[in-house]
Amino acid sequence: MSHMTSQANLRAQSNGSDRSLRLILTEKEIQKTVRKLGKRISKDYEGKELFCVGVLKGALMFMTDLVRNISIPVAYDLMAVSSYGAATKSSGVVRIIKDLDIPIESKHVLVIEDIIDSGLTLNYLITNLRTRNIASLKVCTLLDRPYRREVDVPVDYNGFVISDDFVVGYGLDFDQKHRNLKDIFALE
Ligand code: IMP
Ligand code: MG
């Protein structure tokens, strides 16, 4: 079923593009992992109030699914950052485009990312958040390429370790496209 949806998406989305998409994670696999992560996080933060910080725009889909699988009190806000330089490679020079609306002093903060590659974007972000007198900070990413790290960042929860393919779908984009796909594809 999910596979059929993927194929339909694939045809619809790849119109007008000379690059093809190869399915790597189905909606079903993604949702199963999101449920597991939600359970683990709910257990680890039992008795506490959790504050999720989603990083726009890529982590949007993941965060909305994840928080609905968390059974403890949870609040969230969104941040947007932009990396200077080439579109497909992180430069480490990051600019905050949208900051949090809510002060996070004394909160247990969980940063929600779509994918961590070099770690440069996340490193900048957590260094910034740590200056705000928070109670704790952890990181949850759906996708991870640990072997690509240029800077050591703490990743407390990761959904999938993936290969070096550039991926799109479920929030992740190439040139703002493909974010709406329910599955995750490698761009070829
Ligand atoms: P990093 O700073 O190198 O860790 O890059 C992290 C950011 O780059 C992610 O939050 C994504 O926005 C983007 N990114 C890295 N790899 C991919 C990919 O395969 N597809 C789409 N976006 C990616
Ligand atoms: Mg991102």
Image: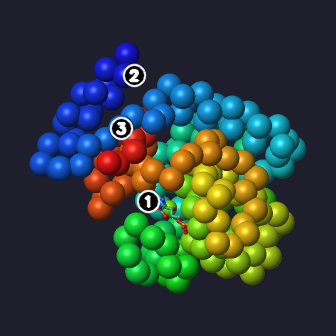
Query: To which residue does mark 1 refer?
Result: 57
Q: Closest to the observer: 17 or 54?
A: 17
Sequence-first tag of 1 and 3: 3
Residue 20: x percent and y percent? 26, 43
Sequence-first tag of 2 and 1: 2
Circle 1 sits in a helix, a strand or a loop, which is it?
loop
Cα–Cα gap, marks 2 and 1: 24 Å
Q: Please tell me how crowded label 3 is: few (under 14), some (14-19), or many (20+) other residues with Cα within 10 Å.
A: some
Circle 2 sits in a helix, a strand or a loop, which is it?
helix
> Does the numbered disc 1 mark a residue whose Cβ is under 8 Å from ligand 2?
yes
Q: How many marks?
A: 3
Circle 3 sits in a helix, a strand or a loop, which is it?
strand
Amino acid at circle 2: Ser
Q: Nearer the viewer, mark 2 or mark 1?
A: 2
Q: Quadrant of residue 136?
A: bottom right
Question: Which mark, by number, is residue 22?
Answer: 3
Q: Quadrant of residue 174?
A: bottom left
Cα–Cα gap, marks 1 and 3: 22 Å
Question: Which mark, by number, is residue 2?
Answer: 2
Residue shown at the point (34%, 48%) measured from the top left? 187
Residue shown at the point (51%, 53%) measured from the top left? 164
Q: Are marks 1 and 3 in contact (CB under 8 Å)?
A: no
Quadrant the N terminus occupies: top left
Q: Please tell me how crowded label 1 is: few (under 14), some (14-19), or many (20+) other residues with Cα within 10 Å.
A: some
Q: Are marks 2 and 1 in contact (CB under 8 Å)?
A: no
